[in-house]
Amino acid sequence: MNLRCGIESRLTDAEHRLKIVFHHRQLDDTDLGRRVRRELKNQSPYFEQSLYVAVVEEEKDPGTYVTSVRARDPEGGTVRYSMSSLLDARSQALLVLDPVTGRVTTRARLDRESVDVHYFRVLAVDDSFPPRTGTTTLQVNVLDTNDHAPTFEWPEDEASIREGVPVGYTVVTVKATDQDAGRNAEVEYSILSTTSGSGTANADDALTFRIDPRTGVVTTRMPLDREKTEVYTVVLSVSDQATPPSARKTANATLVVRVLDDNDNYPQFTERTYSAWIPEDLDYTANPVIARIRATDADSGNNAAVRYAIIGGNTQNTFAIDSMIGDVALVKPLDYESTRSYKIVIRAQDGGSPARSNTTQLLVHVGDVNDNAPRFYTSHFQESVSENVPIGYSMLRIQAYDADEGANAQIKYTIGARDFSGASTENFPITVNTETGWIYTTKQLDREQCSRYSCV
């Protein structure tokens, strides 16, 4: 063993050193032995603890007491203290050690969020010559105070959700953090208010969403209907869990929830059925509009884009409909005597996928015009009668018809008198009932005067 004595290599365990000398008595009378004995008489100061651990709350005023360190000198000499930071140079400016008393105090306000533990090497120096030293370690733990409010990751957030999602569907997950520690950093979420796009809050709005107080997951609490409310503004709150509750700090955030449209509405016609009256002689060549069909869809976008089509009752394609606006036009001639009315089935279909549709009826009544002349059922009537029949005798009924209707179809009968040779006669003995068409005698017949009569 190379036993060296001197300031550069001091023996710190007196008992151990005595044992060395005891087992090497041959050194007693040597210069080395004498030097060892002198060294034993001047021992280094030592601290009461090899590690001092202290705690202090952050944000305390400068001069706040932290702890005291104490070293002893075996010879009873005076000890002076000093310390230097071990890990973070910033620590040096924050704590101060009284060189005489060993009292440690704060030099400035501590911030746990900046440095939560400070480490120092503490040195004790005696008054011997050469001076001897002792060291220890000081660990200062900075305790948290609730000096920070929680902050949302996104103070203003937006989310979109389809109106058809089930209750309990996740809308968004919000996140807030707190720079403090322990319960001061634990956060709890809540909803302060929910307002619809109108800007007013009501009881139904308040029940629309919920937030998990621990995880920040926002979910639906009731079915959504975009046609009722398209935009919700949800004010969220987060609070730390400091004690007492009066010391808790909070923060708010705004969540705008936009409800996306599902094709959940059918087109609705403005009337249950539509009707139109048009004369049969209406000029179809100009494609006149005879009816305006309108339907609306409460959805939005393509889901609300309504297209029209005629799907039934359009005999010989007499009518056409504008697929975009629903105007029905006449495109072929009408004939009251052929078709007096049309029952047209019209479909309104939206542009959703899958599409939704609805139908209505357009009743078109064709108005009669006097476009037909009366016609006899037969073009030639002939009857024989005895000359001695009484006056007023009904000998023959003629009948005609008119394809028109109403006053246009009312027929009145008249006859023009002619004798058999075709010459007019003033005393024609036959006439016709204008209403019934019965031909009857108005004078006594005399075959010898005229055996045949012809009338038109």
Image: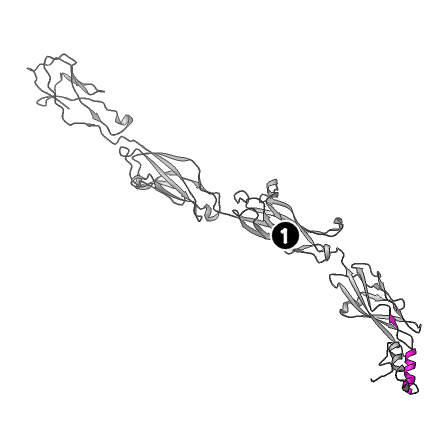
Compared to 227, does 16 lie above or below?
A: below
Please say whether residue 221 is visible from this viewpoint: yes
Q: Nearer the viewer, residue 159 or 215?
A: 215
Query: What's the amino acid at mark 1?
Result: Gly
Which quarter of the rendering shows the C terminus?
A: top left
The x and y percentages for residue 285 are 30, 41
Compared to 270, does 49 lie above or below?
A: below
The x and y percentages for residue 39 are 90, 80
| Residue that appears at 13% across and 16% down | 429
Q: Residue furthest front?
A: 23
Q: Residues within 10 Å of mark 1 (few under 14, many from 20)?
A: many
Which quarter of the rendering shows the N terminus?
A: bottom right
Q: Quadrant of residue 109?
A: bottom right
Q: Is residue 262 left or right of residue 439?
A: right
Q: Quadrant of residue 380?
A: top left
Q: Which residue is mark 1?
A: 216
